[in-house]
Amino acid sequence: MLLVVLGLFYLLAPAGVLWLCRKYKWAKSIGPILLLYFIGAILANLGVFPKSGTESADELLQMQNLFTNVMIPLAIPMMLFSFTYRKSETRDQLIAMITGLLAVVIAVIAGYPIFSPHIPDAPRVAGMYTACLTGGTVNMASVSKSLGSPDSQFVLLNTYDMIVSFIYLMFIMAAGIKLARKFLPVKTLDAVANDDSAIRAELEKAEENPYKGLFTKPGMRDAMWLLAATLVVVGLSAGLAFAMTKILPGSFMMYFILWITTLSIAASFIKPIHDLKYGYDIGMYFIYVFSIVVASMANVRNMDFSGALWILGFLAFMEIVSLTLQLLTAKLFKVDADTAVIASVTYINSPPFVPMIAASMRNSRVLMPGLSIGVIGYAVGNYLGVLICQLLS
């Protein structure tokens, strides 16, 4: 009975948290993922779960592992199906996209010799953070699974990322935008591009309930087709991954995640699949479920905090160096300030933060470039994360 109740709680709690975030400013300011982490961590440490070593505890762990192993493979196709891949509209956007990716990779490689001697399992940490700082939480979770990282490690690293990335975001909003505009060229924009109403409309769109209409007949039809396409991608990826383990070194999960990413990107070019609604938002819901489940497995008495300060230092180093390199290369290639900053924010904080930063800039022109760059980050984050881990191992 406990497993049934807990399973329903895992599936429904994100809906409750999303409702809180839409209704209350304090919840919105914290964000759904962090709130779900708080709830899951509290649940893990209340003492309500069966004691470890018992049959009930083993059954609970099996259920939690099932959730964490299923949610990510389902989320990746859903989130990638609806993305549109376009060549950058301007030279600045293309340069910012490429240099932003390179800046993260260089920052990771540069910081690794300094911090790795003090960080347990350093190559995997570097790989997971590479994925996170080029894509987002979904990429970090995917690489975590593909590299066989314990769930407790993912919870710790993701928590550290939230702390450091929040400080980075506050710096950008308080001083970073102004400093970049003094250091880099600022484009003169027409009235429409800088119109407050355009920015306000984009912010309102970002704040709308993305699941509105999902439970209508058209919404459910799209959801069923999305699920069918996702299952096809997952099935094909599993078969290809299994075949690759027979001829190449590497784990099944690593190949499985990389094939899911590759086939999902390919499927996004199929118009009937691409045009289905709600894919990104259903995928995000799976990430929310994943978040509360892994947090509920994080009993602090069983967690290893060794190297915590060094990991925080490594992450701060990566974010500072990547931002610095982004601005320096922007100076070299004469990229405008707002495009350079929005690219850095997109990679380090992920695309959902783009409208907020665009509003701080009072520049709606960077909305679409920021979101487009984020698409590339989602697409390549898994590859880069695994590659960096393999190179540093």
Image (cartoon, grey):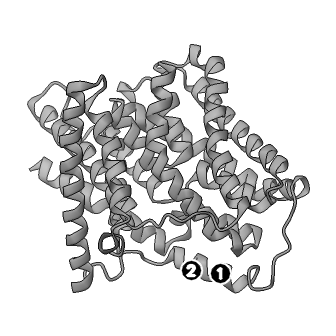
Is residue 285 among what the camera can see? Answer: no
Type of amino acid under label 1: Arg
Q: Is residue 259 above or below residue 93?
A: above
Residue 255: percent from left, percent from top: 30, 36
Q: Residues within 10 Å of mark 1 (few under 14, many from 20)?
A: some
Mark 1 in CB contact with mark 2 (< 8 angstroms)? yes
In the rendered view, tell whether residue 238 sits above or below residue 251. below
Coordinates of residue 207 in the picture (x, y in percent): 52, 75
Q: Secondary structure at mark 2?
A: helix
User: Residue 263: x, y in percent?
Assistant: 32, 52
Asked whether 247 or 242 is in front, the reply is 247
Q: Is residue 249 left or right of residue 34?
A: left
Quickly name the residue at label 2. Answer: 204
Residue bearing mark 1: 200
| Marker disc for residue 240 | none
Pinpoint residue 184: horizontal percent, then vertical percent: 86, 55
Q: CA distance from mark 1 to mark 2?
A: 6 Å
Determine which quarter of the picture holds residue 69: top left
Question: Residue shown at 43%/77% (left/top)?
Answer: 209
Query: In terms of image quadrants, where is residue 218?
Result: bottom left
The three-letter code of the residue at mark 2 reads Glu
